[in-house]
Image (cartoon, rainbow, N blue to C red):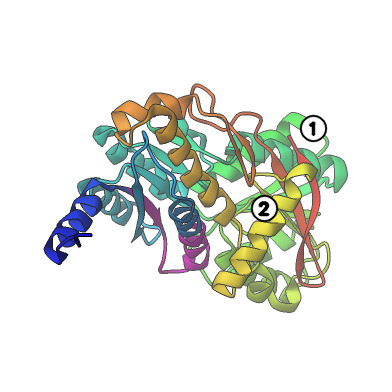
Amino acid sequence: MRRTPPFVLLLLTLASAQAQTVVKIGAAAPYSGQSAHQGKDIENGAQMAIDDLNAKGVTIDGKKVQWVLLAEDDGSDPKQGTAVAQKLVDAGVAGVVGHLNSGTTVPASKIYHSAGVPQISPAATTPLYTHQGFETAFRVVANDNLVGRVLARYTVATLKASKIAVIDDRTAFGQGLADEFVKGVKSTGGAQIVSRQFTSDKAVDFNAILTQIRAHKPDVVFYGGMDAVAGPMLKQMKALGITARLVSGDGICSEKMPILAGDALGDDKVICVVAGGIDKQQQPAYDAFAARYQQRYKLSLQTYAPYAYDAVMVLASAMQQARSADPARYLPALANVRYQGITGTISFDANGDLRNAALTLFTYRHGKKTSLQVVR
């Protein structure tokens, strides 16, 4: 029996490698700065999906595929976000999972749209993102219209708040969420906005605005922003003797919040909402993912890793349906996709928003994030 010469085997190996299609998926989020822990959560979730696709040997049109994640740090900065978006486009990504912040997501979306590259945000909630008329823009979480309404209704109807103070960090996310919350409170009636204050997403001293708020004796302080500011703010609220609950969106609804707030957190002191929700039938899959995440990264998942994981899988599913990783060919399949993910059934409306989006209300008890209820 004749043996195949070594050089022929080498040629065959090279030919096989060349026949393998490489599909690059971009991941963009802050991997530096105050929100780095949230951004890393997105990258970690996306990487787990990429590794699962490779381990399962997922193909496109019957061809072998090597799935690759290209992760870029947008620093939560709009200018850096657009630079990152262009870098990913130039690298030839077939799709992008990102960004975290609304303020980076919106300007970056214009770069992806111009290049025809589909983008799925696992976190950005501003309605503006999916209302620009970009067929490339999608998200797998609820938007601020729904978040604001739900938080307002819960604050007035369940917490029985009659006097509410509002603070936002003047970012696209924080201000947008606060505006929607105020609209919701006014529409429900029965509660009064007694103070509207502003800070920044890098502030550390809130004594001036909190002293002004204290004079109004609010039942609830609503904050539009991220956990890196909310934690120190809670400490200063406690120091000033403000006993009001703190209500906010998913920006503060992290596993790191107890560390940032320390003993100012208290039990049932903070009410926050994640712009996504896990129904009872989804809980086993979600818990299994969280356990895998913990084992792999030696970290508890923060908020967005499951949504980033599903976003990658949705992109891959659309490519398989279209039998192509070419954005121009698989984009129609993405718009009409129906995918059963870790976070639930994912399909998009005409704007690219998640259909039948869920929200989960949380509080903190004994230093642990505790689910209150899932709302649709």
Nearest to the eye among marks 2 and 1: give it. 2
* The N terminus lies in quadrant: bottom left
Between 117 and 20, the residue placed more toward the observer is 20
Dot 1 amino acid type: Gly
Q: Which mark is residue 330?
A: none
Look at 29% across and 34% down and name the residue there: 326
Q: CA distance from mark 2 to mark 1?
A: 19 Å
* The C terminus lies in quadrant: top right
> Is 333 colored magenta in this rendering?
no
Q: What is the secondary structure assignment of the residue under circle 1? A: loop
Between 247 and 81, the residue placed more toward the observer is 81
Is 200 rendered above or below residue 376?
Answer: below
Q: Residue tagged by mark 1? A: 189
Question: In the picture, residue 108 is in which quadrant?
Answer: top left
Q: Residue tagged by mark 2? A: 248
Look at 43% across and 26% down and name the residue there: 333
**Tag 1 or tag 2, which sits nearer the N-term?**
1
Q: Is residue 323 visible?
A: yes
Dot 2 amino acid type: Ser
